[in-house]
Structure formats: structure tokens, C-alpha cells
Image (spheres, rainbow, N blue to C red):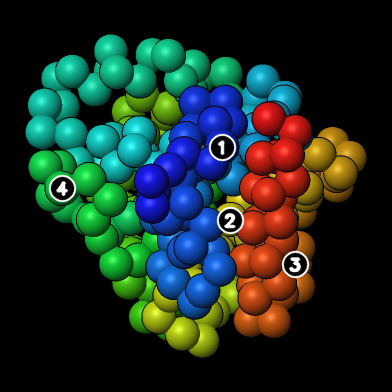
Amino acid sequence: MADEKVLSYNDVVLRQADLDILSGPHFLNDRIIEFYLSYLSSRHAAEDILFVPPSIAFWIKECPDTASLEEFLKPLNLPNRELVLFPINDNIDVSFAEGGNHWSLLAFRRSAKVFIHHDSSSSCMNSSHARRLYRAIFPYISDGVTYMECSNTPKQVNGHDCGLYVIAFARAICNWYENTTPKDKKRWWFSDLEHITPSAISELRSEILELIRGLMVKH
């Protein structure tokens, strides 16, 4: 079959079409982003870090029944998480899976009581969507939280690499968190994102493809 299953990793199933996306200059879909966040979760197994799958982040943002949101969020154990990463997509249609045209990353840091939005587009295209998720979730995550846009977020130079930037941001933030002493955690991770350049993003696309192929051999 043309779109056969090539890898089952944790709860994520990747297909040949996903490899094709990574092989060319294409917009990343939900599955690839969910796969890599799941991979990061396996490598950064601390209970105080949570990588929210794209589908869950989307539902929080667009949930039509806010009364049911509290029950929906309970399995995420948000009150006990120090760092929570939400991939943000600009899709607003809950009936259309894998819609949208842009990805960004919303990071919550409990000790600072702040949500930080990292958008690789020059115009911060997803600002309203990130704020929408923030407004939906902050009553259930912590008291007195605030929201800010990170103005010096690295920017993409084309229309298809936003998902790769989300993956790069998530990886850099997690590395900062795990490799920083409690005293040094008073500083933010912003300088750790400076190495995320267009050339590094191009290499990341190939790196993820090779990671998947390596896992295919093991599985």
C-alpha cells in the first residue's frame, strides 16, 4: 500500500506519507509533531515536564463545552507540572482534523506563573490562537498567571518550516530545563534558542527523518 504504516512509537503511528513530508520542503502535520514530542517525553521523563499532543492542545483551544474542560484536563495533572509545552495550530474547525496553516509553541513555566508564546512567523500569526488557549486553560493551571509574546523568537524564512521551529523550540527549552541548576533557572531559556537558525532547521528535518528510520529498524 502506498501509505502503509512504517512505525508505531508509543501512541503515535507514522505512515509513509509522513516520511514523504520530511523528505521534502513541506509543512509538518500533527503526527510528525506528536511523534517528536513523544520522543522528547521519553528522553525527558521527569514528571514535572509535560508535552501536550497537538490534538489535545487543539481541543483545549477550541472546546465548545467549557463546562467539560475541567474533567478533560484532569489526566494531564497540570497542577503538578513545572513546565508545560503546547503546540499551537491556527485551525479553528473542530470537524476538520489536521487543518490549519501555521504552528507555534506556547510554554508555561509555573515558578514564574507565565505563559510564553514563541512564534517563528515575522508577524506572530498565531498570537490570537495562543491567547485563546491561555484564556481557556489558566483557571485550571495556576492562580495569577500572565501571558507574553517572546519578541526575539527566531524567525523562519519560508512558509513551511513552522512545525520544525516548534520542535526545535521544545527541544531547546527541555535541554535548558534539564541542564540548568536550580539557581540558574532564575534566567530564561531565550538565549538557548539563538542557535535555531534556518540552516539548523534544515538539518533538523533530515535528523528527524533519520531518527524515524533508525527506530523503524529497531521496531
Which residue in the structure is indicated by mark 4?
A: 96
The residue singled out by tag 1 in the image is: 7
Specify whether 25 is left or right of 59.
right
**Gap between marks 4 and 3 measured at Cα:** 37 Å
Q: CA distance from mark 1 to mark 3?
A: 35 Å
- Viewed as shown, does residue 189 lie left or right of 101? right
Q: Say which residue appears at 67% left-offset and 20% top-offset.
A: 47
Task: Check disc 2 and report its element: helix, strand or loop.
Answer: helix
* Secondary element at image label 3: helix
Q: Residues within 10 Å of mark 1 (few under 14, many from 20)?
A: some
What is the crowding at mark 3: few (fewer than 14 residues within 10 Å), some, or many (at least 20)?
few
Instruction: Tell me if mark 2 has few (under 14), some (14-19) or many (20+) residues whose alpha carbon lies within 10 angstroms of its own.
Output: many
Please identify the quarter of the rendering in which residue 144 is found: top left
C-alpha distance separating marks 3 and 2: 17 Å
Which residue is label 2 attached to? Answer: 167
Q: Quadrant of residue 209?
A: bottom right
Q: Amino acid at mark 1?
A: Leu
